Amino acid sequence: MGFARPLGLLVPQFVIFTLLATIFSVVNISILAPVMEILFGSSSQSDCDCGEAVTEVVAEMPPLDFSIRYFVDLFYYYLNTYKVEEGVIATLYFVCSVLITSVFLANIFRYLSTLILERVRINVIENLRNKAFFAITHFDLGYFTEKRKGDIMSRVSSDVLEVETSVVSSLKVLFKEPFLIIGFFTAMFFTSPKLTLYSMILIPLSGGIISYIAKRLKRRARLTQDTLGRISNVIEESLSGMRIIKAFSAKKYITEKFRGEISNYSRHNYRMASRFNLASPISEFLGVFVVCLIILIGGSMVLNKDSSLTGSDFIVFLAFFSQVLTPAKAISNSLTTINRGLASGERIFELMDSQTKINEKPGARAIDSFNEAIRFENVSFGYEDKLVLKNINLEIPKGKVIALVGPSGGGKSTLVDLIPRFYDPKSGVITIDGADLRDCTISGVRGLMGIVTQESILFNDTIFNNIAFGKPNATLEEVKAAARVAHADIFIEQFDEGYETLIGERGTKLSGGQRQRLSIARAVLKNPPVLILDEATSALDSESEKYVQDAIENIMQNRTAIIIAHRLSTIQNADKIVVIKDGEIIQEGTHSTLMKSGGLYKKLIEMQSF
Ligand SMILES: Nc1ncnc2c1ncn2[C@@H]1O[C@H](COP(=O)(O)OP(=O)(O)O)[C@@H](O)[C@H]1O
Ligand SMILES: [Mg+2]
């Protein structure tokens, strides 16, 4: 209900509409009595006192009053007048027109109350989706690799859908069906208190059995959602890796994997469905069973000429009774939907409540400039138990270019990921101008840094918006200037729509080099004091690499930069070159000192020039 806000006037409106809809539904059925009276009562005239002449004769226009009694009397007054003055056929017309009016109104009000339910449902879903997505954007980078992305996807998409259906069910169970049940029960009570008492015992009994069955569904429902998450995982993986799947003719591998997950899902799904669908036949069977009991009891009363129940009253009673069953059944069905919704809701809340590991200390220092140096002091780090970085000591002074080199898997990317605090060290500290990163505000630290990685992360939007991404109110002039520095202006201007060109999902309409230059333009526009380039050029062909290399040299002037380069020729002018292997710094120095001292760096250089 918290997510349904703002509810405002919706609740009172809903109550009024539902009440009116209920009243007119009761009226619809009550009209059965005079109809039968007209059909049967008029043929067997007055010599019979067998209880059929139930029509109350209201000879006088009743005094105006807003009670149910008044409307009933008014109806019978007109009924009587028609009968006396115009005959039974005219009376039949009258009764039918009252029925049509009443059905019309009942449906209008039911429609209006449904509209309100829908409003609430839509509010809930909108708020839920927004909150869930907002929560996701706050998770640490580590979260997305630890927990599977497909699982998150299924929680924010299909679980939200489950909640959506159950929202309507819960509202109906809370606010609508009870009205109907009370309305029909009241009408039943006026028709025959005795029979009503019997049914009040029978209905909860059968209802209890049905809701028991519903309850047992909850566990299964949860299981199916989990397996569904694994399926979207496989699909996502296959879609993004389709090129590789085809290239390696790995269709068989991936289809088998998919088939396995699907058949797992189907098995669970079937088990769940076989229970889920049991509710309806059982409830129908029990319903008819109960109706038969009532027919036996009521029928005997009528046949035994019990003065409290006439034949036509009994028919009306049965009609009401059948109507009570509908909302009662709806409640029992809703319980299963609600249970599924609760299971899904739990999964969504679990996601929202996930604890982040990277948190800002209360009263953290807002840092907005970089003046001296970033220092790693005895830093160790591992994603899991195994250490990926061991005892790193490193100084990155302002205005210098530091290059990290070494064999792949050595921990270079991990090291630079610690600087914007994507992860916290297991031990040791990283300081910026002497302050522990963990004592500074996260936005402050990240605000000082620009990052370009090997894969350029672009969004399905215009070129302008992709460049202006990190600086929300950038002007076109600023964006153009950044594009010029990144050597991106030439190709952008060749597009008909220039900076307004849509680049497609993940920038698929651009070449690798173009995408990378957009990423660089984005970093340039942000104009950060510290620049991190993680193999920014290694995915490029040599022509684009030349452009991107030029772009990088453009932006590195007067800036602090940490560069991971795959091609060593590009970092020979760095102020300091750090060689990392197996999570440790094994060599440090300039190109010439390292060449002189030999070792891994010299070996790597020789391998590349060869
Ligand atoms: N998100 C991650 N979760 C677990 N292990 C990881 C993760 N990222 C990298 N690793 C591991 O950490 C080690 C260092 O990786 P990385 O820093 O990417 O090396 P480099 O950039 O030098 O090639 C590797 O052994 C890799 O398997
Ligand atoms: Mg790397």
Image (spheres, rainbow, N blue to C red):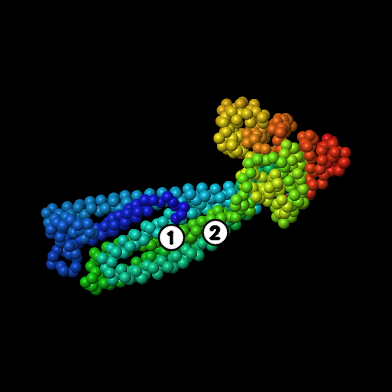
Say above or below: 51 vs 71: below
Say above or below: 131 vs 568: below
Do the residues under discs 2 and 1 have CB atoms within 8 angstroms?
Answer: no
**How far from the left and from the top, in percent, is residue 314?**
26, 66
Mark with earlier residue (2, 1): 2
Give the secondary structure at mark 1: helix
- Position of the C terminus by quadrant: top right
| Residue 215 placement, left or right of 67 | right
Residue 552 appears anywhere in the view: no
Q: Using the image as rendered, state which of residue 241 and residue 250 is in the foreground.
A: 241
Q: Using the image as rendered, state which of residue 223 and residue 446 is in the foreground.
A: 446
Q: Is mark 2 within 8 Å of ligand 1?
A: no
Residue 306 appears anywhere in the view: yes
Q: Residue at x 48, y 54 (%)?
A: 163
- Position of the N terminus by quadrant: bottom left
Marks 2 and 1, Cα distance to the nearest angstrom?
18 Å
Question: Counting other residues with Cα less than 10 Å from the Cα at mark 2, is it few (<14), some (14-19), or many (20 or more)?
Answer: some
Q: Using the image as rendered, state which of residue 141 and residue 266 is in the foreground.
A: 141
| Residue 479 placement, left or right of 371 | left
Say above or below: 392 vs 516: below
**How far from the left and from the top, in percent, is residue 127?**
48, 49
What number is the disc on residue 270?
Answer: none
Residue bearing the label numbered 1: 333
Residue bearing the label numbered 2: 222
Say what amino acid the circle numbered 1 marks. Answer: Asn
Q: Residue at x 54, y 62 (%)?
A: 219
**How far from the left and from the top, in percent, is residue 99?**
25, 53
Q: Residue at x 20, y 52 (%)?
A: 93
Mark nearer the viewer, 2 or 1 = 2
